[in-house]
Amino acid sequence: MQNSNHRTFWAALIEKAYAKLHGSYDIHNGGLICQATTELTGGYSLGYEIEHIPNTHELLMKSMTEETILLCTASSRNDTNNEVTREDGIIFNHVYALSCLETTRGLSILVENPWNFEVKNETEKREGMYFKRKFCMSPSEFESKFNTLRICRMVQGAIVSELVPNSCGTTNTNGQWKVDISERIGPNCKLILALNQMPANFRPNSRLQTPDLPMDYLKQFHLAIYKFPPGAPIIIDASTLATGSKVNVCKRIATNIQSSYIRNSKPVLQCIGCREVFLEVTDVQVGAYLVYATTKGGGQVSCVLRVWLQKTGHK
């Protein structure tokens, strides 16, 4: 079954299939937006604190021209888990969907509550329009009511799509992967890497796992990609679990390369972020690369590296 409009995403249908795969709709209870969007779309998720976005208007308009899903939340500092309705109708810690429209009066942001109901009390409707299922906002109004923006990007036209679990910690217990870009795959490719932290009890292909990540468990990641050190002795983990394409571009390294091999090397690209990070190498060259991930604050955590190769020309 396929929609003729490639820009339409049938979330309810995919949600049903995901529930059937895992045996129950209970799998959808709780969890994090980043994990849900990546699981349901096969893409990668980027999170932004709205107050730190230099230009919200520009970011939203750019996202609307790409294959993305836009979501937002109003987080409560006092109640980090429960969905509580504010006086103006906005629900704390609840995910809203976004779409945008450029009008003669400027950018109009349509916010939708996926719960699909409206407050029936007419008095409440008159006092606050945010009780409605759908409502429009200006960018300034949006910035004052919500504090987190989530953009899920879907990778179209990927010639390679792989997922390789691992674990990582501080410098001495870092996670490492080897990525081989062969002549067979060819040049003129964009390499996309997305690293996601997973629940403490995460097991690949396991049906039974709690989707929530407690706040004290969340880690800051440093993700970097290097040209593979010439002559570096490595052992590839024979149990590497890669799903997606059969090319098997990405492999987990069983015995990590010592930091002395890369301490003086300049990374091709690197980034720092909490819970999920991503890198895009726009014109990756044929060769071998080392993907290197560490956490700040100690402790070993489960993670998953998603790898895509996309021919240049696709957005």
Image (cartoon, helix red, strand yellow):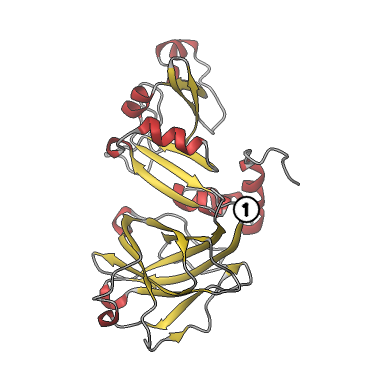
Q: Nearer the viewer, residue 118 or 176?
A: 176
The quarter holding residue 184 reads bottom right
The quarter holding residue 42 reads bottom right
The quarter holding residue 255 reads bottom left
Residue 254 % position (x, y): 42, 83
Q: Amino acid at mark 1?
A: Tyr
Residue 94 visible in image:
no
Residue at the disc numbered 1: 18
Residue at the spot 32% in from the left edge and 58% down from the top edge: 271
Vertical placement of residue 73 versus 225, above or below? above
Q: Is residue 56 left or right of residue 29?
A: left
Residue at the spot 57% in from the left edge and 74% down from the top edge: 183
Q: Around disc 1, counting alpha carbons within 10 Å, would you say few (fewer than 14), some (14 to 19), or many (20 or more)?
A: some
Residue at the spot 53% in from the left edge and 69% down from the top edge: 204
Residue 191 % position (x, y): 48, 61
Vertical placement of residue 95 versus 131, above or below? below
Residue at the spot 49% in from the left edge and 11% down from the top edge: 122
Residue 53 % position (x, y): 31, 38
Residue 173 % position (x, y): 31, 76
Q: Secondary structure at mark 1?
A: helix
Q: Is residue 51 left or right of residue 92?
A: left
